[in-house]
Amino acid sequence: MDRRVFIGSLALGTLAMPRAAGAQPARKVYRIGVLGIGPTSDLVGPQPRSPYVNALLRGLRELGYIYGEHFVTEPRGSEGKPERFPGLAAELVRLQVDVIVASGPALPALKQATSTIPIVMGGGDAVGLGYAQSLSHPGGNITGLSLQSVELTGKRLELLRELVPGAALVAVLWDRASLPNWQAAEAAARKRGWKLLSIEIRDTGEIEGAFRAATDARAGVLLVFAAGLLFSQARRVAELAARSRLPAMYELRAYVETGGLISYSGDLKEIWRRAAVFVDKILKGARPGDLPIEQPSKFELVINLKTAEALGLTIPQSLRLRADQLIE
């Protein structure tokens, strides 16, 4: 071979080597489905308006994930209409997302739609619904974090009675998604000898009539469960409670932040932030059925003092001292 041709070929080969060695397969961008209660527009992008989805993305950032580089979200919101969950769940399944993070009320639709795509609860009761074998070993495709809302029902009733000791009748607003909560309230009231008025909401158009029923029955206080229909109507429910002069205990602090009186619950933002840990483990190959369901590590009592003043209520010092936040 001509010496000059050989040297030229060697040089070309040397130049080509780094390019070939540096060629890397494109990194997979994971698709994380998000199924929530509110509008889809609140769930979109790297800085969503939803404080809960925002907390999820913050948790992923803390674990080193960069939106658009390592993952994107596929958000779907029910617009406060639980009947939309089956269609939205089917959409996410057709998209073949890698994992779905969902609000508790969406679990029945998701369980119906898929038994293979991993589902992470951002607060829910998979064991109570029969979708997980136990907290320690879920066994199926659903894991995540429980809100322990049913277990806190008796405590909420006790706080209401402490707030308004003379109330003879407690009205309870609930919908089909919060049936276990209503059953827990019944059991707790029976044990304590308290009277409850059941007001089931089947449609958002029934909410105003529900408050009329409570006042007509001379209820002294109100217990509101957040699931399904009512959560998306938090501001409206809080306004109607104020207009009806009914001191109300809510399942979640979102109601109190929009003008409701008092709430006691697990910290939902922290729950959604912790959901990122489950997503991370699943994306790295863990099976959801092997990941124990977590219970809340932090519970918060939130009281709106402005609402109390408008209702002419004096918050007992014992409640003030125990409150995690007093909104003034």
Image: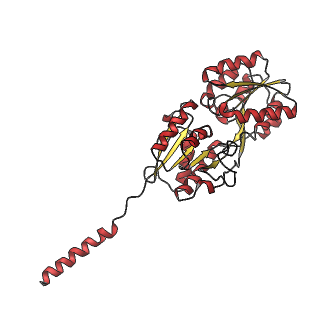
Q: Residue furthest top?
A: 216
What residue lies at 82% left-to-right and 35% top-to-bottom? 188
Give the tally of numbered discs. Answer: 0
Q: Is residue 46 left or right of residue 123?
A: left
- The C terminus appears in which quarter of the rendering? top right
Q: Is residue 42 visible?
A: no
Q: Position of residue 310 (x, y in %)?
A: 72, 22
In the image, residue 30 sits, relative to residue 79, either above or below, namely: below
Q: For this rendering, which residue is in front, 2 or 304? A: 2
Residue 114, x across and y down, in percent = 54, 45
Report the residue at 83% width, 37% height from top. 318
Q: Is residue 89 visible?
A: yes
Q: Say which quadrant the N terminus sits in.
A: bottom left
Q: Is residue 91 above or below residue 2?
A: above
Residue 115 screen position, x and y as percent: 56, 48
Q: Viewed as shown, does residue 27 lie left or right of 11?
A: right
Residue at x 64%, y 20% (from the top left corner):
206
Task: Judge whether 207 appears above or below 298 on screen.
Answer: above
User: Could you say which is closer to the camera, residue 306 or residue 94?
Assistant: 94
Whole-percent x, y for residue 219 in the image? 79, 21
User: In which image quadrant can residue 156 be found?
Assistant: top right
Q: Is the image coloured rainbow, by chain, by secondary structure, or in one colour?
A: secondary structure
